Image: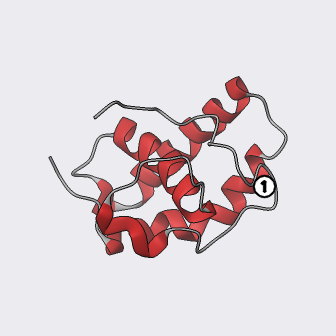
Amino acid sequence: MPHWTPIKNEPFINIMDDYRREIENKDAKATKEITRQYAHRLYQEYEILSEHTENAVYEHLSYFDDLLAGISNMKHAKKDIGYYGNFPRTFNKNKLNLARVMRSR
């Protein structure tokens, strides 16, 4: 399985402001659709993401949004701790992204 590296995370950071503006005050269905659209665009525009699936990009986008926001009730990879809370949200400050795919470990 390919890993998410700092270079691969850069496109997610670059679009985060726009992405968050789009999902603000949206319900779960709309948030998932917007997230799907952003994931598709990222997947198409950034060759560096091609070793992942488009669905993996979708999942990483919502995970990375929560990570950057500093959501405390989420599991995150130890390698990602440097991103934790670096880019707080202006809305839903303590809530998981509605598009988030949760996995048990």
Q: Could you tell me which residue is drawn at 62 percent across and 42 percent down?
A: 96
Q: Is residue 60 left or right of residue 90?
A: left
Colour convention of the picture: secondary structure
Please tell me whether mark 1 sits on a helix, a strand or a loop.
helix
Report the amino acid beneath label 1. Arg
Quarter of the rendering containing residue 86:
bottom right
Q: Residue at x 76, y 48 (%)?
A: 22
Q: Nearer the viewer, residue 42 or 84?
A: 84
Residue 26: x and y, percent? Answer: 80, 35
Query: Farthest residue in the top direction?
Result: 29
Observer-nearest of 62 and 11: 62
Quarter of the rendering containing residue 7: bottom left
Answer above or below: position of 65 versus 53. Answer: below
Q: Quadrant of the C terminus?
A: top left
- Horizontal side of 5 relative to 20 (left or right) equals left
Q: Residue at x 65, y 38 (%)?
A: 34
Find residue 12 and report its horizontal and vertical position in percent: 50, 62
> Crowding at label 1, few (<14), some or many (≥20) Cα neighbours within 10 Å?
few
The residue indicated by pointer 1 is 21
Look at the picture and state if 59 lies above or below 32.
below
Q: Residue lying furthest left in this view?
A: 1
Residue 103 occupies quadrant:
top left
Number of numbered callouts drawn: 1
Residue extending furthest toward the front? 73
* Residue 41 sits above or below residue 78 on the image: above
The image position of residue 53, as x and y in percent, is 29, 40
Q: Is residue 77 left or right of residue 102?
A: left
- Residue 101 on image: x %, y %: 46, 32
